[in-house]
Amino acid sequence: MQEKIKKLIEGALKNLGIEEIDFVVEHPEDLINGDYSTNVAMVCAKNFKQNPKELAEKIVGTLRQAQGEFPEIQEIQVAGAGFINFFLSPKFFHGSIEEILNNEDFARNRTLQNKKIMVEYTDPNPFKPFHIGHLMTNAIGESIARILESSGADVSRANYQGDIGLHVAKAIWGLQKRGLPNPDLSTAEKANYIGECYSLGAGEYGPIRLGDEEKESPVKVEIDEINKKIYDRTDAKINKIYEWGFKVTMEAFEDLYRILGTKFDFYFLESEVAQIGENIVRDNVGKVFKESDGAIIFKGEEHDPKLHTRVFITSTGLPTYETKELGLAEKKFRMNPNMNLSLVITANEQADYMRVVAKALSLIHLEYTDKMRHITHGMMRLARGATAEGLASGKMSSRKGNVVTGESLLRDTIALVSEKVKDREWDEEKKKKISEQVGVSAIKYSILKQSTGGDIAFDFEKSISFEGDSGPYLQYSYARANSVIEKARGENILPDPHLQAGNNVVFEVEKLLYRFPEIVSRSAAEYEPHYIANYLIELARAFNSFYGNTVIVDKEDKTSPYKVALTFAFTFVMKKGLHLLGIEAPEKM
RNA sequence: GCACCCGUAGUGAAAUGGAUAUCACAACAGUCUUCGGAACUGUCGUUGGGGGUUCGAAUCCCUCCGGGUGCACCA
């Protein structure tokens, strides 16, 4: 429709002797100003120094002559400073409902057809807790993956995990100190225990303060020793603990991915990319990298004043994170030579050095330059007035004083929903499933409703809302619409998008439904799920308002089949939209 | 110090350079409605300060103030 209107305007301009003008056709913010709007008169006025309102009237006069060929357009008006507003006809809206009901692929587009894209996200580390940050990255990554898929891309999901390094040594030190947990514990409980052991080790590793002086902790020596053993695998006892702990944390992560609705195609481990990265660095010393104080470094600022120097191989000969990142990128492209795009999603604290790594890699492989893209998201921040302790250190505390991890937030939220559904007449399995779906929805929506770049305020009391601007509100609207459909079925009222029955009322929901594909395209182009989240909340509100003010199922009402068709269309769009956010749409909740 | 990101009602957010800056939460006032009250209908209230560009700025430029993150052997 947008294209049609654009062509119509171009035709009118031609008649007026105006050509090659850059103007936009868009939805006005407020439906009062029509369904589409253009700034063409204002742009022309600027170029030809004319009064925009007069020019707008002139253009509209010409447009009206051609309007007969466009039955979808009911009215054209001049408004405001010189906007030309288009109001679509009931015929158009009835047609759009029919389109949604008949076309399975209504929301799909082909902009990324046959493009191979790998999306890397989540990236938790074995032996460490699953943080809230991992929850954020997962929600954003999964949603972006699904949005790209709906644009036709061939998407694979990747997860990169630090299976070696100091953090593992810290956890193993803690495990040796406290002993292995009771074997009867659940996987999640064992994983939590390992996380606690990590915290213990990490706490003891730092220097000890004696007055003004700092002294190296004796534990540091022990942990460094364990770290070496992990690398060279010479200690059978440590190997055994390592293998056990690795398996437990990885299994616990898998349980979380199942609840979150993510299925990874590839798992990369630091240990397997370190060597690839190291080879690249060593092969390019003198060309890209330099030796300095015994280390191998990359001087980013020599290539771009906004970059800085980073160490790639330490003076003790160990590859750093940067080098592993280099190896990871190389591995991805090697196993997937036809890949068009490699997306990596992380928190924005990694933005600066990822830029350095990307620069170094593009100097070695020029062909990768345009195929790598790093998307960063904000951090969890404490909302003003909220009560939580220890946030500054990156560890949020709940009221009970326990550390709030991503895993515990998820668990607590699901428990909260379970409380709400405990009196439903469902079996236990169904209650559990619905609780998980609604709990995940609450968390994911609160992350995805805002643009990816910014921080997300966290308030333990209010973060997980079930009302208003929330995931469960969307699910509730969907479930409610399904109940309406069920009732219609019971009364034998079949959906019919054609029946107008002399009724030319157009509901607000209809004015929003046909816009869904545009929203999806924009989200895909900008890698921004929040456009979909915002759209769905507006759509749900419009539907609930329709529901509240109209009797949909009514045998006496001749327009009832149309209203049922509209309800169907709403459920189709809502279900697809929720899917794109990585949220399930239960029929009942 | 340098670099990057950010500053919008009491709170949390939205707004491809466009119209009277939108939405939710909170607060306040209603609806107790048939199809699910996890709802609906209202009221209240906002672009950090100062310049500039533009017909038009929350958006672009400059500057000041305030916050976050990153800057050599951690990841």
Image: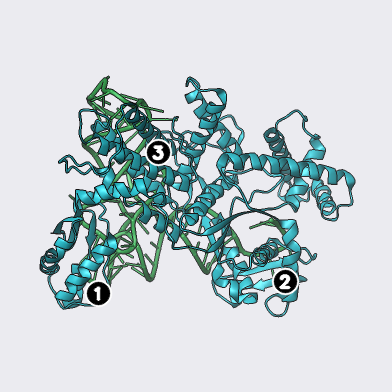
Q: How many marks?
A: 3
Q: Where in the figure is residue A346, as x and y percent of width and height?
A: 57, 55
Q: Is residue A379 visible?
A: yes
Label 1 secondary element: loop
Query: Tags 3 and 1 in contact by the CB under 8 Å rule?
Result: no
Please rate how many residues cluster around mark 3, counting C-alpha atoms within 10 Å: few if below 14, some from 14 to 19, many from 20.
many
The residue positioned farthest toward the bottom in the image shown = A287
Lateral position of residue A288 relative to residue A493, left or right: right
What chain is tagged by disc 1?
A: A
Q: Which mark is residue A474?
A: 3
Q: Which mark is residue A21?
A: 1
Quarter of the image containing the N terminus of chain A? bottom left
Kind of residue at disc 3: Leu
What chain is tagged by disc 2?
A: A
Q: Quadrant of residue A311?
A: bottom right
Query: Tags 1 and 2 in contact by the CB under 8 Å rule?
Result: no
Which circle's residue, 3 or 1, is located before the other in the chain?
A: 1
Chain in cyan, by letter, is A
Kind of residue at disc 2: Val
Please name which of the two marks, 1 or 2, marks the residue nearer to the observer. 1
Query: Does residue A555 sit above or below A516 in this rendering?
Result: above
Q: Where in the figure is residue A315, as x and y percent of width and height?
A: 78, 67
Depth check: give the residue in front, A30 or B2: A30
Q: Which residue is mark 2?
A: A281
Kind of residue at disc 1: Ile
Tell me how far mark 3 sits from mark 1, CA to CA.
41 Å
Quarter of the image containing the C terminus of chain A? top left
Q: Where in the figure is residue A544, as x and y percent of width and height?
A: 31, 35
Tell me how far mark 3 sits from mark 2, CA to CA.
50 Å
What chain is tagged by disc 3?
A: A
